[in-house]
Amino acid sequence: MIEKEQIENELKNIIDPNVNVDLITAKSVKSLKVENGNVQLHIELGYPAKSFIAGFKQQITDKIQALDGVNKVDVDVNVKIVSHGVQNTLKPIENIKNIIAVASGKGGVGKSTTSVNLALALAAEGARVGILDADIYGPSIPMMLGLSGYPDSKDNKTMMPKVSYGIQTISIGYLIDADQPMIWRGPMVTNALQQLLNDTNWDDLDYLIVDLPPGTGDIQLTLSQQIPVSGAVIVTTPQDIALIDAQRGLGMFEKVNVPVLGIIENMSMHICSNCGHEEAIFGEGGGIAMAEKNGLELLGSLPLDKQIREFADSGRPTVVAIPESRPAEIYREIARKMSAKLALKSKDFSNKFPNIVVQNT
C-alpha cells in the first residue's frame, strides 16, 4: 500500500514551471492525506493562473496515479494571492496587496505597451489589477486603453479609477488636455505621482502595475523610497545601448532594496508578415546574458510585431484584441512567472499584529 512519504517524494519531482522549483520547495502543498491507496492533495498557488491550473492539475494527477499502490487520486488546486513585503520603512497601501514597478533604463523599448499587456494578462489569469501611469511628462496609458475624460469623484477630494477591460487605471492624462505639455519641475512631478496613487479609490487590488517613465530620475527615486513596492521588472531590448541603461535601472532598485523579479526582453525578433523571415534587428541574446549576469530570470521574450503596436495605438491591446495569439500567450506566461516570483518572496504581516494601546485606568 502506498505511503505518504512516497507521495511527498514524488511531489519533490514535480516542478512548477512558473517558479522553476518543485511543489514541496515552493510550499504549495497545503494538505496531503493518504488512506487505503486513496490520495487527497490540496495545492495552493500564490499567483493568478487561470489558464494554467487545469493542465497542471492533470499533470500532478497523472504522476501520482502512476505510482504503485495508488487507487484513486483527488487533486485540488486553488489560488490565494497575499501581500508581500515592501521596503523596510514602509507599509502596504490599503486596498492594494502588491505594487509592481515596470521600468526601463531608456525610452523606446516598449515599456508602456508591455505594462498594459501585463496588467491585462494578470487580469485574464484571474487577478484584480490596476495600472498607474507614472509617466507624468508623457502619459500613454489612456490612449492604449481607449480611455479619456476626467475621472469621477464621489467626495470632490478623491478620484475613482477609470476602468477598461476589467482593470482599474489612473493617469495624469485623464486630468489634462491631450496636447498640453507638462512643464513641471521635479518636486511637482513627484507630488503628482503620490497624489495619483494615494487619492485614487482603488478597489481591492491584488496587483497595481506602475508604468514608470524611462531613466532613473525623480519619479523613480520617489517610487523607490516613498511608495511601498513589492517588486520590479526591467524591460529592455537586446540592443547593447538598451542593456547598458537597463543595468542602471536594475542597480537603482537594488540600492533601495526593491527586489527585481526578472527581465523582459522586448522586440527580440522580427518576423516578416509577408514571407515569415526572422531577423534579430536589435541583436540577440542580450536579455538572457543580462539575466545570467545579475542572477535573475529572463521572464520572457516578445517579438517585434507590427500588430502589438497597432492594437496598442487603437486602444485594444494584444491580450484583449487577439487573446489566442502567440504574443498574448507570451504576455500571460510572463505575467504568471512575474507574479509567481513575487509569491516566493517574504509575505507582509503588518496587518496580522494587533495594535497595543496603553491607557491609564
Image (cartoon, rainbow, N blue to C red):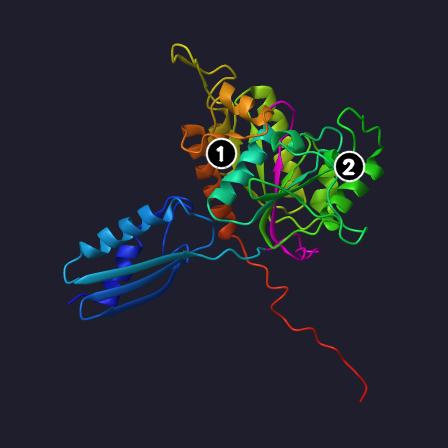
Q: Is residue 86 magenta?
A: yes
Instruction: Please say if 241 is above or below 225.
Output: above
Q: Any mark on residue 319, and which?
A: 1
User: Which residue is located at x 63 percent, y 53 percent?
Assistant: 203
- Residue 282 point in image, percent of width and height: 52, 17
Q: Is residue 42 magenta?
A: no
Instruction: Please say if 136 is above or below 223.
Output: above
- Residue 233 point in image, percent of width and height: 57, 38
325 displayed left or right of 149: left
Q: Which residue is mark 2?
A: 175
Magenta residues: mostly which secondary structure?
loop
250 displayed left or right of 265: right
Q: Any mark on residue 118, and which?
A: none
Determine contact: label 2, label 1, CB under 8 Å: no
The front one of 162 and 357 is 162
**Badge 2 or badge 1: first in the primary sequence:** 2
Kindly state the secondary structure of the residue where label 2 is placed: loop
User: Which residue is located at x 77 percent, y 36 percent?
Assistant: 175
| Extent of the magenta region | 85-109
- Residue 353 sits in quarter: bottom right
Instruction: Please say if 104 is above or below 260.
Output: above
User: Which residue is located at x 79 percent, y 54 percent?
Assistant: 155
Q: Quadrant of the N terminus?
A: bottom left
Q: Quadrant of the C terminus?
A: bottom right
